[in-house]
Amino acid sequence: MALKVSRSLKENLTGSGVAPVVGEYERRYKNSQSGGLAEEKRGYKRFTDIYYDLVTDFYEYGWGRSFHFAPRVPGESFKASLTRHEHFLAEKLMLKPGMVVADLGCGIGGPLLEIARFSGAKVVGVNINGHQLDRARQLTEEAGLMDQVEFLECDFLDVDAPDESFDAVYGIEATCCAPDKVSIYGEAYRLLKPAGYLGIYEYILTDRFDASNPDHLRIKYDIELGGGLLDIDFIATVDDALRTVGFEILENRDLAEQDGPSIPWYQPLVGSGVSIASFRSSRIGRAITHQSLRAMEMLRIAPQGSARVADTLNLCADAMVEAGRLGIFSPMYFIHARKPE
Ligand SMILES: C[S@@+](CC[C@H](N)C(=O)[O-])C[C@H]1O[C@@H](n2cnc3c(N)ncnc32)[C@H](O)[C@@H]1O
């Protein structure tokens, strides 16, 4: 399977090669950390696009078709928890047949297809990355949902759609890639019809994050570098941005904090899962993938740079586990907001 990922990576980056693109990506992130954050934020489109060119096949191989985390309860499978998280959003937005909905940053369309099937609404996936959209279109055809699903290849800060053209807008662990929250929520506001609902699963730093603690800073750095992010915001920045653009906040809470028995969202990255998907994402599964890629690079079967992509993702995965245990970060700050009438 690692061979399949590396082959796909090679095909996708035929023109440039993997190693130079990894190099550019790392340089950009490092520049953002040494005084060049504003410059890199201006170049966010390229930063995001090359990151997803590099990691998409690893994500699908290691995690599945839905590129997000989910709250989980004992006895619930990893896959069932992801689906429940997607249904939760669809229910909050009261999606139903006849509605037209935008998915901002739709990945390869795993959640979008599930939400379309579950709700009967028409879903338009917005994504800046062409490689992901090729895969999303293929999966949509396989699912026979071509009449109910559409894709727009564009920046989600400048969506190619008229004002007030959507009944609802959602984004799953994607708006964290925007250079600032006011711009992305402002675009969602423009796209929504009056009284339309917004639903977001946002990446946030919690109040426990201490910017003077070197360990916290290192963890944040690794999540960003490995996760294709330039800067993770605090909850207050997110809430303030929603109000600034005019949204009425109906509900905002961190779903990582569950009442009753629960399995932490970061558990699949630690291991001990029994499903193939969670084994591949676990520490042992990731180490096996890494070693296979190294060997294939030496044998010149995999393109140079493949193992470095896996290393960067591992850095992020380990940092997510640390962040989750310390409670300083969450990938599931849930926002349910409404555009006034
Ligand atoms: C972590 S993935 C989540 C994908 C999807 N929501 C899911 O849960 O499977 C983040 C997604 O946001 C997209 N994205 C990031 N920045 C974007 C931008 N400026 N415009 C459009 N899409 C963007 C990426 O291409 C990627 O598909």
Image: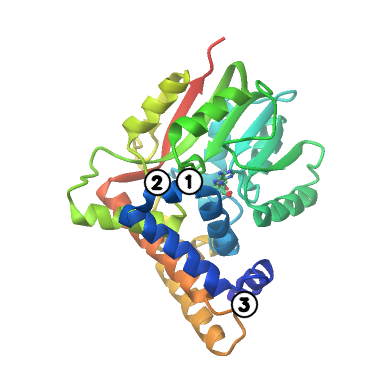
Q: Is residue 188 above or below residue 113?
A: above
Residue ID at (50%, 50%): 43
Q: Residues within 10 Å of mark 3 (few under 14, many from 20)?
A: some
Determine which of the numbered discs, if any, sits on residue 187 in the image: none
Upstream in sequence: badge 2 or badge 3: 3
Secondary element at image label 2:
helix
Upstream in sequence: badge 3 or badge 1: 3
What number of labels is visible?
3
Secondary element at image label 1:
helix
Q: Is residue 54 left or right of residue 14?
A: left
Residue ID at (61%, 53%): 65
Q: Is residue 104 visible?
A: yes
The image quadrant of residue 190 is: top right
Secondary element at image label 3:
helix
Q: Which residue in the structure is indicated by mark 2?
A: 38
Q: Is residue 280 left or right of residue 29?
A: right
Mark 3 close to ligand 1, CB under 8 Å: no
Instruction: Give the residue type that dot 2 points to.
Output: Ala
Q: Which residue in the structure is indicated by mark 1?
A: 42
The image quadrant of residue 12 is: bottom right
Q: Is residue 222 above or below residue 202?
A: below
Q: Which residue in the structure is indicated by mark 3?
A: 3
Instruction: Give the residue type that dot 1 points to.
Output: Arg
Residue ID at (58%, 57%): 64
Residue ID at (24%, 44%): 209
Q: Residues within 10 Å of mark 1 (few under 14, many from 20)?
A: few
